[in-house]
Amino acid sequence: MSIMTLPTENKVGFTTRIPNRLSEFKSKLSNLNVDDEIVMFKLGSKLALRRCNRPIILLSMGVGIAAMRPIILNFIKNKSNIPYLVNVNVDSSNDFIFKDELDNLSDETYKNYWLNSRKVFYTELEQLTQIDNPIYYIVGSYEFIKETIQNLKSKNVNISDIVIDQKDEVLNQLFGA
């Protein structure tokens, strides 16, 4: 599940996959309509924006862009201690959610790349690894996260320069894989 709103928006919006085999939670979610109200607790994200005078590179697959939206909005609102932010989303369906909203925010310090294949994604990632000392945020399927981390590791990116929206143990496991 990816939270796609900021606290200042006075609502919690999120996206999630609804697989063929539903958990009880997702079964109940699948019966709701847009704008239905629910009660949720223990919400959180490990994707806090690091403001340490380093570029930020957001790498997401499909609806994983939803988790990047609040990071981008936070950056646009306050760019202090972040020289620039690059947002890369890959979606083979070419149905990029938030594309219009996020493209309207582009400027000299914020750029979007909307890619339709993993092959193109890894070519673009090759270029992005040439950037000096960035922090990489990764959101997507388990396989996407794993492959992207392994790709970054092969380019000598340190584990401390990678952020995923999961427990530290998961990052350690994927980085060591």
Image: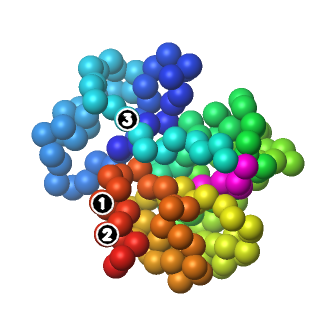
Q: Which residue is mark 1?
A: 169
For the residues labelled 1 and 2, say whether their Cβ atoms are less than 8 Å apart.
yes
Taking the image as shown, residue 74 lies to the left or right of residue 63, namely: right
Instruction: Indicate yes or no whether the magenta region holds residue 10.
Output: no
* Quadrant into which the C terminus falls: bottom left
Mark 1 crowdedness (10 Å alpha carbons): few <14, some 14-19, many ≥20 = few
Q: Which residue is mark 3?
A: 44
The amino acid on which the numbered mark 1 sits, given as a three-letter code, is Glu
Q: Is residue 24 above or below residue 117?
A: above
The image shows residue 55 at horizontal and vertical percentages of 71, 55
The amino acid on which the numbered mark 3 sits, given as a three-letter code, is Gly
Magenta portion: prevailing SS class = strand
Q: Residue furthest right?
A: 108
Q: Give me the C-alpha separation between circle 1 and circle 2.
A: 6 Å
The image shows residue 93 at horizontal and vertical percentages of 52, 61
Q: Which residue is mark 2?
A: 173
Q: Nearer the viewer, mark 1 or mark 3?
A: 1
Taking the image as shown, residue 156 lies to the left or right of residue 163, namely: right
Q: Nearer the viewer, mark 2 or mark 3?
A: 2
Q: Secondary structure at mark 3?
A: loop
The amino acid on which the numbered mark 2 sits, given as a three-letter code, is Gln
Mark nearer the N terminus (1 vs 3): 3
Residue 155 figure quarter: bottom right
Instruction: State how many labels appear.
Output: 3
Q: Residue at x 25, y 54 (%)?
A: 19
